[in-house]
Image (spheres, rainbow, N blue to C red):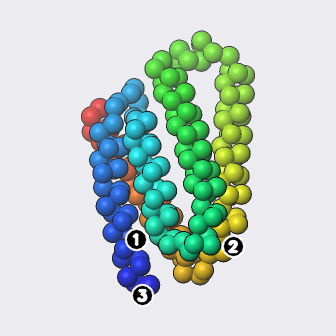
Amino acid sequence: MMIKKIAVVTTAILITASPLAYAAETSSSTVGMTHPSAADLNSLTDARVGMIKAALQLTPDQEKYWPAVEDAIRARAKNRQARWERVAELRDSSAIEALHERDPVELMQRRAASLSQRGADLKKVADAWEPLYKTLSEDQKKRMAFVTVVAARGIRESIERRVESEDEDE
């Protein structure tokens, strides 16, 4: 029974990840490393949320905790997207120009604020997950760990392919 569930989750991941990897590779380019478009990031977030929920196979009692988890995941993704857009704006000029035109102390303060925001976002996700995680069965916890590992591996491989592709273009 567990093998059947893993096969279903793996198939869902592969079906979901294939178009996303293609979208990430074909998204618009900026100077330097490219970032996925807003539409790509929204699709990735939708797929990620759907994949996690499908893998967990929540019971009706557990479903009441899901909206808080989904909201926290989406808020974190939205804030990440906003940070990427700010970085893309900075990349429009060379690093030397950016340093000459900007106050280095201001850059450090922005970076600190960004790191604080990332920490706050992760805390919100952890706080949202806590009540749901306490209700998960051992099988659900194993599926959650499996999905997390597979998703992280897929993201890492997409980034590596993109970097290799950019190296070949140069």
Asked whether disc 2 touches disc 1, contact meaning CB atoms under 8 Å apart, the reply is no
Give the structural element (helix, strand or loop) at label 3. loop
> Is residue 14 or residue 135 the one in the foreground?
135
Q: Dividing the image into 4 quarters, which one contains the C terminus?
A: top left
Among the 4 quarters of the image, the one containing residue 164: top left
Q: Give the residue type that dot 2 points to.
A: Lys
Label 1: how many Cα within 10 Å (few below 14, some 14–19, many 20+): many
- Earlier residue among tags 3 and 1: 3
Please indicate, yes or no, whether residue 156 appears anywhere in the rendered image. no
Give the structural element (helix, strand or loop) at label 1. helix
Q: Position of residue 56 (x, y in %)?
A: 51, 71
Give the structural element (helix, strand or loop) at label 2. helix
- Earlier residue among tags 2 and 1: 1
Among the 4 quarters of the image, the one containing residue 79: top right
Q: Residue at x 50, y 64 (%)?
A: 53
Please indicate, yes or no, whether residue 72 appears anywhere in the rendered image. yes
Q: Is residue 35 left or right of residue 90?
A: left
Q: Residue furthest bottom?
A: 1
Among the 4 quarters of the image, the one containing residue 135: bottom right
> Is residue 5 or residue 118 the one in the foreground?
5
| 103 versus 21 height, above or below | above
Q: Dividing the image into 4 quarters, which one contains the N terminus?
A: bottom left
Q: Residue furthest left?
A: 169
> Is residue 57 or residue 92 the one in the foreground?
57
Check disc 3 and report the residue beneath it: 1
Q: Give the residue type that dot 1 points to.
A: Val
Q: Is residue 74 left or right of residue 15?
A: right
Check disc 2 and report the residue beneath it: 134
Q: Position of residue 151 (x, y in %)?
A: 45, 60
Check disc 1 and report the residue beneath it: 9
Separation of disc 3 and disc 1 at Cα?
13 Å
Q: Position of residue 152 (x, y in %)?
A: 48, 59
